[in-house]
Amino acid sequence: MRATTLHAPFDIRYTEVPDPEMTAPTDAIVKVTAACVCGSDLWNYRGENQINPGMTIGHECLGEVVAVGAAVKNVAIGDHVVVPFCHCDNTCPDCQAGVQSACRHGGFTLSGQGELSRVAQADGSLVKLDGVPDPALVPSLLALTDVMPTGWHAAVSAGVRPGSTVVVIGDGAVGLCGVLAASVMGAERVVAMSRHESRQRLATAFGATHIIAERGEDGIAAVQELTAGIGADAVLECVGTGQSMETAFQIARAGSTVGFVGAPHGVELPVRRMFVKNIGLAGGMAPVRRYLPELLDLVLEGRIDPGKVFDLTLPMDQVADAYAAMDERRAIKVALTPVG
Amino acid sequence: MRATTLHAPFDIRYTEVPDPEMTAPTDAIVKVTAACVCGSDLWNYRGENQINPGMTIGHECLGEVVAVGAAVKNVAIGDHVVVPFCHCDNTCPDCQAGVQSACRHGGFTLSGQGELSRVAQADGSLVKLDGVPDPALVPSLLALTDVMPTGWHAAVSAGVRPGSTVVVIGDGAVGLCGVLAASVMGAERVVAMSRHESRQRLATAFGATHIIAERGEDGIAAVQELTAGIGADAVLECVGTGQSMETAFQIARAGSTVGFVGAPHGVELPVRRMFVKNIGLAGGMAPVRRYLPELLDLVLEGRIDPGKVFDLTLPMDQVADAYAAMDERRAIKVALTPVG
């Protein structure tokens, strides 16, 4: 098949690779019908994670099942499915505790920006759609594979409550979905920290009531002013850098929780401040499968439209352009359509 | 007055110092009627916190009010009171959010191991007793000034639930009170990590169902074995060192929360593990005043007896012996009685 492969920092190609193979009777293979680039793919693209030259990449896709292992019961060849980026049996103790992203029998979508992808624990992982999805819904369904449940997880982890003041750090697709989540959950004030006009507009469309364009000390001061020096009731940390985490703990009020979902890179947690102010940290890699049924309903009922995060669509063989557009922040998030 | 003063590491004395003075109309002065040494005093005693030679020390005491500022309404001269180690107005936004330990108008008991101590925000801080307390209750009332609410806070922060498996790291008075808290909250299995026989006995008296004497890798393995490799539903970190925190995150199950109350010294939080396993951290300096009414009721009803943590009582002018006994772990916690 053809798939996206990474060879060195900024060297990404759409090339021929071996087809994925089932390795367990609980596996399935899906033909990718819609895909996209994730902000976290950029860590690899930029060489901030280790690159194994020629490795496939891409963990967000919708698909049609083309093969199932002998033990798979819930999905069949021909089914259209949402593929959560992290796979799970949805029955182990960790899954039952709502942490499907830590399932001990799980795995990850590894060639989602390709023609085919293997799914471990197909019965637990895949969520079946009712036939071929309406093309108008595809962007929002695609957002359900990662960014929307991840933003939702940040809001759940931070304990967003009706009537509260929520600050979202990060204006990537996850942060914007965090804004949408906080808004749906009834927050009274949803503050998006963003200095990019197109992202500010989308944040507002997703329910942000305030935009703070400043960063660092100025951004912290702006939140403190907005909250009369008290700080935010809940902070969603959707970036994962040392600076964003530091900002999060500076603007979180005493007794609140920072919900974090950005894969941490170079983060040192301010344990002393956490202790003195009783500011907690919760979250992590999002248990997508946990939230999928609920979020799928919201999409199908037209109550949320997270697909708006896609502001560029390219055929998959132009994947290099897709990564460049996101890396240079010319696009918020790029959808990839199958070719050939 | 005479009070305990610290002059250099391990140089602690009972000496003459100026009487504390009220500095605001919301202050009160109490005559100390019962006092004790806290595990956190040992950080100062050992020189791990900065010492200002001659500084008074001691933040846990019961007292009789001997002076009140003009604005004080809730307590009067002659009242017997429980003095929380951290003071609070109990009305500011942080107090209302249940973080009285972060009250912006608060302060700390600074000469609790002396004859007199100043209390800021007397109306918010002090909890009045019904006359002179029954001597048999004094140890448990004294435990309410810090260690019992602190152990309770660890359990609340870790989200202890009925039926759960809870591991308590730390067999000092706070850890032992954490065992008691988890037990009162209905945990099915309460595991005390302790290698000291007298502390193991007290942990068992407080409701521990299991004792793990091993530390480090062996201790982690023992918890994993006990929980069939899943880990603990809740972990109470009641020490504050790098090693204890590391152990906490190794034994906490995916999706759980480490409740921490030990003042952190040399702690680096394992943010990567927290992310991958969705293990949160919550807690901090205990909002004693928040829990005092509830815990006072439990003591007066005879449902908890946290005063059992005191296994040595000395007159206050033998305070140097008290510190040495705790530092050398010959005593779990030492009560100090007024002299003269």
Image (tube, coloured by chain):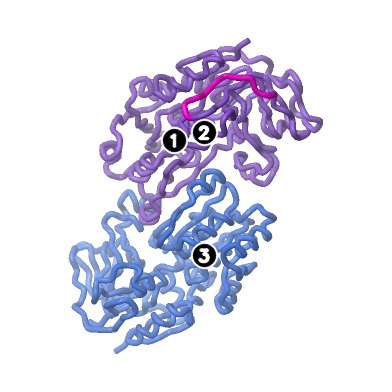
Chain colours: A purple, B blue
Residue closest to the eye, B39 or B63: B39
Quadrant in which the C terminus of chain A is drawn: top right
Q: Which amino acid type corresponds to the residue marked 1 in the rendered image?
A: Cys
Q: CA distance from mark 3 to mark 1?
A: 34 Å
Question: On the rendered structure, is A315 left or right of B87?
Answer: right
Q: If the image is split into quadrants, where does the N terminus of chain A sit?
A: top right
Question: Do badges 3 and 2 share one subunit?
Answer: no
Q: Which residue is mark 3?
A: B178
Q: Position of residue A53 (x, y in %)?
A: 56, 31
Residue pictured at 47% horizontal, 81% vertical = B136
Count of numbered marks? 3
* Mark 3–mark 2 CB contact (< 8 Å): no
**Residue of label 1:** A238
**Percent x, y of residue B176:** 52, 69
Q: Above or below — where is A219 with respect to B153?
A: above
- Taking the image as drawn, is residue A301 in sight? no
Q: Which residue is mark 2?
A: A150
The percent position of residue B122, horizontal first and vertical second, equals 28, 64
In the picture shown, does residue B156 fall above or below A314? Answer: below
Q: Chain of mark 3?
A: B
Above or below, comparing residue B150 to residue A332 in the picture: below
Residue located farthest toward the bottom when viewing the structure as drawn = B340
**Element carrying mark 2:** helix
The Cα atoms of the two marked residues, 1 and 2, are separated by 9 Å
Of the pair A31 and B301, the residue shown nearer to us: A31
Circles 1 and 2, Cβ within 8 Å, touching? The answer is yes
